[in-house]
């Protein structure tokens, strides 16, 4: 097995635990985060801080990017001080951030122009699976390149799926997050409706989670609803972004528009930096 030297850009809620799992698996990881202080946890776990992004490209074989959105990913790859400013020939770049299919294709073209390889690999699963190394990778790109890096991905994911060419991984990710958004709004509306009829939140959550109506997300988010505290695991603003991207990619169903509107309204009401489950505060009014 090839022992790649890894580079990692973006140490937010997802990036930091994912890097820790790569370190645990024995990889050398060079890291860079725009706000440099946020590298501290990864460095304490054994990562090395890169001087800048070009240096990170120069000193790594496989470079991961896990940042907020399309604009951030584009800036990191192609900006004045971006990754592709260094000699990138034969390097493998893997974008694990959630972006549009169009942005993924653009990044792939930019990498190809530099003689580099590109995979899109958005992940399904939030902070807990990121900590436990049980994410699901939804990869788009060349199957042979993916095969090469599968052992690396195994350190962060329980399952790596090759969806198809670049663009299809993003399409799959936006689709599964749409279902997640429906579940979150459905859970919030159900608990609030039950409350109107005199059913306590705790009782209603037990009914949901002990019945066929319950699922992974209703179990995961129950404790936050009971405490009425929503520190971000998956920031609500990122779900609004995903619904915006999905809508731009043609999502147009009876439920898609009202769910997107709820998330937009929640963000406008300053809930963007709270967890996605804070959608319940928006619905409570
Ligand atoms: P986060 O905690 O908000 O972290 C965002 C990261 O992006 C930070 O490292 C931030 O740097 C960086 N960033 C933002 N704008 C930037 C820019 N213009 N230039 C350079 N860096 C920039 O986000 P997260 O929860 O880790 O999510 C990251 C990505 O994964 C998003 O695309 C999200 O949709 C996706 N995702 C999230 C989850 C989840 O449950 N959290 C699950 C699956 C996928 P600073 O520290 O300098 O701000």
Image (spheres, rainbow, N blue to C red):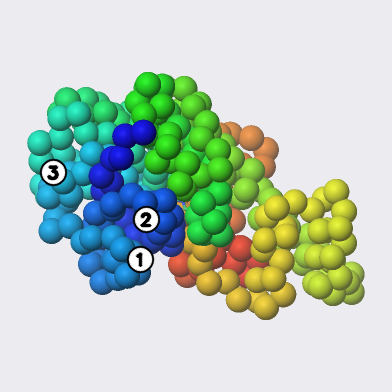
Look at mark 2 in the image and give the residue it sits on.
Answer: 23
Residue 109 lies in quadrant: top left
Locate residue 122, reporting x and y percent. Answer: 45, 41
Q: Is residue 12 left or right of residue 61?
A: right
Locate residue 53, reporting x and y percent. Answer: 17, 51
The quarter of the image holding the N terminus is top left
Q: Is residue 77 visible?
A: yes
Q: Is residue 243 left or right of residue 96?
A: right
- Which of disc 3 and disc 2 is earlier in sequence? 2
Look at mark 3 in the image and give the residue it sits on.
Answer: 58
Look at mark 1 in the image and give the residue it sits on.
Answer: 45
Under circle 2, the secondary element is: helix
Q: Nearer the viewer, mark 1 or mark 3?
A: 1
Res 177 label: none
Locate residue 278, reporting x and y percent. Answer: 59, 67
Answer with the quadrant where ligand 1 appears in the image: bottom left
- Which of disc 1 and disc 2 is earlier in sequence? 2
Under circle 3, the secondary element is: helix
Residue positioned 32% across, 45% down in the render: 64
Q: Residues within 10 Å of mark 1 (few under 14, many from 20)?
A: some
Q: CA distance from mark 1 to mark 3?
A: 22 Å
Q: Is residue 171 visible?
A: no
Q: Is residue 22 left or right of residue 115?
A: right
């Amino acid at each position: 097995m090839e022992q790649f030297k890894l580079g990692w850009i973006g140490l937010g809620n997802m990036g930091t635990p994912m890097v820790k799992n790569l370190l645990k698996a024995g990889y050398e990881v060079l890291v860079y985060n725009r706000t440099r202080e946020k590298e501290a946890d990864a460095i304490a776990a054994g990562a090395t801080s890169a001087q800048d992004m070009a240096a990170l490209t120069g000193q790594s074989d496989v470079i991961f990017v896990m940042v907020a959105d399309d604009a951030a990913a584009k800036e990191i790859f192609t900006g004045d001080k971006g990754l592709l400013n260094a000699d990138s020939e034969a390097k493998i770049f893997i974008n694990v951030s959630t972006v549009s299919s169009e942005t993924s294709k653009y990044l792939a073209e930019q990498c190809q122009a530099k003689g580099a390889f590109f995979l899109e690999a958005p992940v399904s699963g939030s902070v807990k699976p990121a900590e436990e190394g049980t994410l699901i990778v939804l990869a788009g790109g060349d199957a042979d390149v993916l095969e090469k890096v599968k052992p690396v991905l195994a350190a962060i994911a329980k399952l790596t799926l090759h969806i198809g060419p670049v663009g299809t991984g993003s399409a799959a990710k936006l689709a599964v997050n749409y279902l997640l958004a429906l579940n979150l709004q459905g859970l919030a509306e159900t608990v609030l409706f039950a409350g109107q009829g005199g059913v306590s939140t705790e009782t209603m959550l037990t009914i949901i989670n002990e019945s066929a109506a319950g699922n992974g997300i209703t179990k995961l988010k129950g404790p936050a609803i009971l405490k009425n505290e929503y520190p971000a695991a998956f920031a609500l603003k990122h779900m609004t972004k995903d619904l915006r991207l999905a809508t731009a990619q043609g999502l147009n169903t009876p439920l898609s528009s009202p769910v997107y509107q709820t998330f937009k309204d929640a963000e406008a009401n300053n809930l963007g930096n709270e967890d996605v489950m804070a959608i319940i505060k928006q619905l409570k009014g």
